[in-house]
Amino acid sequence: MRLFTALLLLATAACASAQTATKPIEIKVVVIAMFEQGADTSDVPGEYQYWVEREHLSIILPFPQGYHDLRLNSDGILGVVTGVGTARAAATIMALGSDPRFDLTHAYFLVAGIAGIDPQIGSLGSAVWSDYIVDGDLAHEIDAREIPKDWTTGYVPLGKSKPFEQPRAARFGDDGNVYHLNTALVDWAFNLTKNTELPDTPAIKARRMEYDTGNPSSPAHRPPFVLRGDNLSAATFWHGKLMSQWARDWVKYMTDGKGIYAVCGMEDTGTLQSLTWLARAHKLDINRVLVLRTASNFDQQRTGLTAAESLAETKVTKYSAYMPALDSAYRVGHIVVDNLVANWPQTRDHIPTN
């Protein structure tokens, strides 16, 4: 009997030790970048590098089920690179949320990347907090050369017969079409960062003045600033004045007039789709998600160029405000991240509000 008791105690101790050894790491903030140019440090940066270097994300965690190895620091900040496009983003974030190494139940999620911006809304290098993330891929489409004369676009909502047909109610619901983030959290993040000084250069000042929007006090002409505006996410990298007008109309339509298009990215509905389903599985809290995009370029041609000519010069690392936009994403984003971590005794269980 004594031998049995001793063995039972040893087995219990071993089990407890194994549980302690495999206890998931509690993550405070997940910073989500979409691409990196080369190495994670010490070369021409992508969206990830400033976070790795400045937040000291020095612990490398293999992540073969995702796009790129993960990085962690001692404060509980986890960095992830999704890869470009909605498909890679969705797959990477689902893999992260299903990874038993991490406890994400109290984590905040910050998407921090660059984007094209509407010159009617903001300027190069500006930082945009979004309330609505709208999908720009789920649709019917016919070639623009074959659209009826009274149509403004060949893009038609799923289940509809013509552009912007009412009633808007989607045939398959809004799951995947529109994501509305926690407005109270977005309010808090915006108010915390709205006076952040953003980098400006003579080169991007000269470029932004080449955009004639018909408004002498156009936001396009302002030095970089922090603003609110909504996000159109599409795997197709579109460009041009007519496409920009489509984006304004599409976001307005899909949000029932509540959203105002500001920036275009390529991954965020994929990221939000996975985060939404992971929240449904009680892996995380969907109310703790923020999306920040900074303007590396305008979404259309400047005065004197065609859309095709403008697109030809709009390439990664060659964007008009590529480096300032990367810097802006960190400058604005880290204020939120560092605040959440510094106040973890409160923010762990209570989402901050104004």
Image (cartoon, helix red, strand yellow):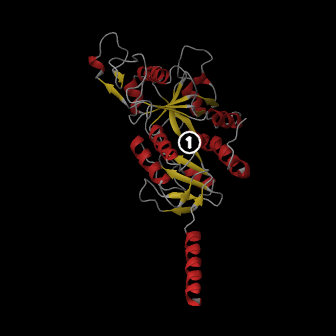
Instruction: Specify whether 255 is left or right of 64.
Output: right
Residue at image location 47% in from the left, 49% down from the top: 93
Residue found at the far left of this picture: 146
Q: Give the residue number, with chain letter if any, for mark 1.
A: 286
Image position of 196 (left or right of 135): right
Image location (x, y in percent) of residue 169: 43, 23
Q: Nearer the viewer, residue 348 or 57?
A: 348
Q: Is residue 12 visible?
A: yes
Relative to 227, does residue 151 appear above or below in the rendering?
Answer: above
Residue occupying image coordinates x 45% and y 23%? 250
Q: Looking at the image, how many numbered discs can be counted on the residues?
A: 1
Question: How far across and down, in percent of the image, does residue 331 sit?
Answer: 65, 43
Quadrant of the snapshot with the C terminus: top right
The residue positioned 61% from the left and 15% from the top of the image is 216
Question: Element type at marker 1?
Answer: helix
**Amino acid type, mark 1:** Ile
* Rendered view: 22 above or below 212: below
Comparing 206 with 135, the one in front is: 135
